[in-house]
């Protein structure tokens, strides 16, 4: 990326402009033009109906497996694990919930299963939002509290304990030890060229189930399951058909929002900003992949792409006075506000576009009148976003260096999570109660901790190029200056903050599951996972020709061979 000052021909105001490389839009019109061409989306309703009927038939077969009278708990839990890994759990929410509730009613301390079974049960229950004591692993440790080599000796046992230990909360030392122990074992497998499990170990280290987006790892899990000699062919066929059918739905949605974005012609007025419609859709898909949330993905993708442009207006383009005016008119939220006449044309267009999109969402809400309270919280999310963007711009304008704690209080919100979550709730319809929206406004630990993960991972990967263009200090610089440490040491300490924040995410996810539905809490958990997707190695949202392009190609272009 390179940067330059660019003055307006009309007012000759010097403006910073980021020249993004790769180009602003990495995909062009691909997802519009290919919708009816190379992506092979069928227009044959008869063929689509045949696939739907086949999926329904396979679903009934799997339900019969789930409700079979067998008393073998391990068999049932292994089946649920396979269903979830293969991306099929959205078909069986009720059945899985009933089975796991029954399992949770038993005293796990009385189980005499091996560590594979114990870890599997522990993970599935915590994923479901059930509190399970980590003390059930004590029987697999020695007098020093370390895990016995004899108890965790095989690949299956190591992998099961590794995935379970990811679900650790603060103070659960035995799970900290379990994660360290199994991570070492997997690293040894991954580095051993003679190990038949090397690739699988390497993938697990990169994408543990907790931190991986469900739809991202589905294709890999299907490929792995296909090689399993104990695979259930009905499940495998179901997973492949569902993956391809759902991918076609995603392609249609992406075509719709891409055409909407192109028809807006907004980027002609805001050419300095990142053009990230496709990547914004990936964020929305990450928040909820289930087919029934199609409307939610569409409106969330629109808000995300507008938030991206808004971020660049505050960070790069506008003067301080323009930002102050823009923030104030957003607060008033009035399409006829004469205050916008003092703004540059591009900012007027952006302001009217934001209000127009929210107006359309409000009309959609009013059609059914099932969540009339929702639009208020959605608008408040956008107002709050502009306020924190302005606070950061004010720091930059004044040359102020906040303390790390002061910075994080604002920067957690500027991740946009407090903007995205209410919109995602709108997309869930009646499933989102007013209590859920009020919960977001109460700054819950789950959302705050998710914001910490997102902010710190983003800052660690992006702070160097942002400082080159002229940007307020990131978490890295704030920490370095406050504690007088090197960049390397600061990043190590921020890594510890990320680890703690993940524990907070898990703790609040589990503790809040008795008050709010799993479906609601999962939106925030998935946002945390998105940070791991986009910012694990680099800023994959700004620079999209690396892993990001690979993810998009895999999830949205390449089907699974049947």
Image: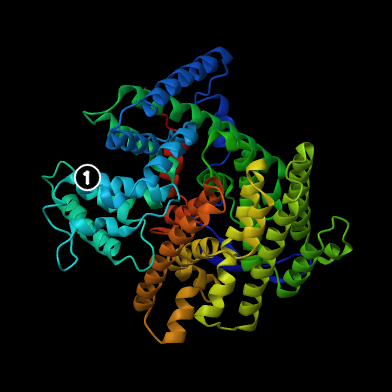
Left or right? Give the position of 336 relative to 396.
right
State the image coordinates of residue 197 (x, y, percent, origin top left): 18, 43
Left or right? Give the position of 176 relative to 553.
left
- The structure residue drawn at horizontal position 49% and vertical position 35%, both measured from the top left corner, is 94
Left or right? Give the position of 451 relative to 162.
right
Reading the image, the residue beneath label 1 is: 113
- The structure residue drawn at horizontal position 58% and vertical position 55%, both measured from the top left corner, is 274
Which residue is more in the foreground, 416 or 312? 416
Query: In the rendered image of this protein, does residue 486 appear above or below residue 162?
Result: below
State the image coordinates of residue 253 (x, y, percent, origin top left): 59, 35
Left or right? Give the position of 125 relative to 71.
right
How many marks do you count on the picture?
A: 1
State the image coordinates of residue 255 (x, y, percent, origin top left): 60, 34
Q: Is residue 125 visible?
A: yes
Quadrant in which residue 121 is drawn: top left
Which residue is more in the foreground, 321 or 486? 486
């Amino acid at each position: 990326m390179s940067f330059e000052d660019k003055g307006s021909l009309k007012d000759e105001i010097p403006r910073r402009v980021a020249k993004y490389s790769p180009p602003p839009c990495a995909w062009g019109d691909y997802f519009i033009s290919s919708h009816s061409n190379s992506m092979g989306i069928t227009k044959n309703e008869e063929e689509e109906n045949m696939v739907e009927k086949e999926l329904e038939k396979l679903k009934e077969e799997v339900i019969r497996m789930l409700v079979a009278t067998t008393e073998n708990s391990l068999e049932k839990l292994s089946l649920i694990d396979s269903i979830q890994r293969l991306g099929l759990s959205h078909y069986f929410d009720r059945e899985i919930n009933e089975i796991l509730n029954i399992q949770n009613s038993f005293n796990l301390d009385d189980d005499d299963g091996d560590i594979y079974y114990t870890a599997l049960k522990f993970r599935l229950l915590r994923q479901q939002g059930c509190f399970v004591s980590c003390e059930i692993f004590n029987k697999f440790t020695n007098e020093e509290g370390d895990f016995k080599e004899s108890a965790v000796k095989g690949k299956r046992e190591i992998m099961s304990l590794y995935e379970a230990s990811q679900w650790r909360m603060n103070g659960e030392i035995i799970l900290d030890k379990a994660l360290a122990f199994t991570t070492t074992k997997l690293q040894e497998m991954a580095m051993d060229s003679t190990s038949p499990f090397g690739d699988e170990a390497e993938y697990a280290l990169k994408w543990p189930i907790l931190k991986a987006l469900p739809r991202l790892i589905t294709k890999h899990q299907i490929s792995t399951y296909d090689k399993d000699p104990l695979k259930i062919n009905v499940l495998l066929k179901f997973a492949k058909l569902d993956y391809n059918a759902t991918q076609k739905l995603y392609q249609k949605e992406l075509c719709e929002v891409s055409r909407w974005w192109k028809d807006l012609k907004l980027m002609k007025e805001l050419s300095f900003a990142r053009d990230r419609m496709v990547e914004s859709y990936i964020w929305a898909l990450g928040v909820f992949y289930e087919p029934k949330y199609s409307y939610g993905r569409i409106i969330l993708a629109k808000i995300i792409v507008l938030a991206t442009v808004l971020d660049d207006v505050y960070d790069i383009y506008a003067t301080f006075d323009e930002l102050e005016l823009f923030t104030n008119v957003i607060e008033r939220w009035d399409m006829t506000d004469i205050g916008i006449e003092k703004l540059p044309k591009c900012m007027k267009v952006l302001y009217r576009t934001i209000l127009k999109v929210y107006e359309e969402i409000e009309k959609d809400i009013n059609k059914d009148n099932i969540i009339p309270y929702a639009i208020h919280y959605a608008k408040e999310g956008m107002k709050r976003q502009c306020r924190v963007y302005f606070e950061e711009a004010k720091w930059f304008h004044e040359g102020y260096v906040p303390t790390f704690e002061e910075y994080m209080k604002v920067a957690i919100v500027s991740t946009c999570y407090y903007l995205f979550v209410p919109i995602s709730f709108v997309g869930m319809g009646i499933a989102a109660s007013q209590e859920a929206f009020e919960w977001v406004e109460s700054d819950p630990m789950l959302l705050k901790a998710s914001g910490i993960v997102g902010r710190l991972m983003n800052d660690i990967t992006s702070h160097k190029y942002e400082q080159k263009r002229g940007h307020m200090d990131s978490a890295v610089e704030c920490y370095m200056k406050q504690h007088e440490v090197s960049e390397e040491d600061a990043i190590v300490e921020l890594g510890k903050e990320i680890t703690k924040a993940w524990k907070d995410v898990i703790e609040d996810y589990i503790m809040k599951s008795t008050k709010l539905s799993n479906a609601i809490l999962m939106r925030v958990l998935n946002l945390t996972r998105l940070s791991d997707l986009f910012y694990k190695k680099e800023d994959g949202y700004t620079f999209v020709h690396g892993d990001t392009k690979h993810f998009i190609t895999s999830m949205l272009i390449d089907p699974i061979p049947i």
